[in-house]
Amino acid sequence: MIAVTAFVVGVIFAVGLVLGGMTQPLKVIAFLDVSGGAWDPSLALVMGGALTVYVAGFRWVKRRARPVFEQTFFLPERSDMPPRLFVGGGLFGAGWALSGFCPGPALVSVGAGMAEAWYFFPAMLAGMGLFQLYERRLGDASQGIEAGQEAPVAGGQE
């Protein structure tokens, strides 16, 4: 039942991305180009609508004693904003602005056979793979510190 629900929600999300224009790279780039003279604010309405649904839905769901398919809710426990959050957000934004795709719409566009997405998608997967390697290296470094070893310094500098 969980898989069926996830599939239905994924299809609804994909249809919303297509209807909202989020799978059209030129429309996304026009939205992000606020100073180029061809700004298209229509995606702000799409994002505002999504935010409204999220806020209302989250408040409604939090009133429940427990989730439908789990025993407890899994909510973030951290409230700080580490520098890596800003670096990741900056990289995400730069990739979105340069390509007109972010991961969700890119996946939908690959499924629809859009040629532009086939250029972006492998690059996105490579970036995810590089991030995983980086995280593993950080994990190994922090384990070394816990074991009394020195961790390598980023960039090879000491």
Image (tube, grey):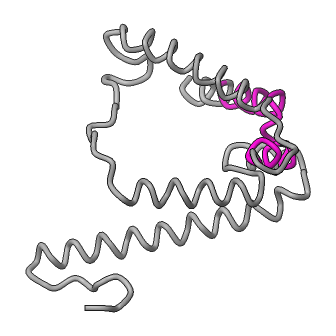
| Residue 47 image offset from top left, x and y in percent | 66, 29
Along the line of sight, which residue is nearer the eye, 72 or 109? 109
Q: Which residues are magenta?
A: 9-33
| Residue 55 image offset from top left, x and y in percent | 50, 18
| Residue 93 image offset from top left, x and y in percent | 62, 54
Whether the magenta-drawn stretch holds residue 31 is answered as yes
Along the line of sight, which residue is nearer the eye, 2 or 136? 136
- Is the residue 100 above or below the residue 124 in the image? above
- Is the residue 156 above or below the residue 48 in the image? below
Choose top left, top right, bottom left or bottom right for residue 54: top right
Choose top left, top right, bottom left or bottom right for residue 22: top right
Instruction: From the viewer's perspective, tell me whether residue 22 is left or right of residue 153.
Output: right
- Residue projecting furthest to the bottom: 157
Give the position of the N terminus as an image quadrant: top right
Instruction: From the viewer's perspective, tell me whether residue 2 is left or right of residue 59.
Output: right
Q: How many marks?
A: 0
| Secondary structure mainly formed by the magenta segment | helix
Whether the magenta-drawn stretch holds residue 17 is answered as yes
- Is the residue 115 above or below the residue 109 in the image? below
**Image point (77%, 58%), residue name:** 99
**Image point (39%, 68%), residue name:** 135
Instruction: From the viewer's perspective, tell me whether residue 149 is left or right of residue 102.
Output: left
Instruction: From the viewer's perspective, tell me whether residue 21 is left or right of residue 132.
Output: right
- Is the residue 54 above or below the residue 106 in the image? above
Give the position of the C terminus as an image quadrant: bottom left
**Image point (29%, 69%), residue name:** 139
**Image point (43%, 12%), residue name:** 59
Choose top left, top right, bottom left or bottom right for residue 2: top right
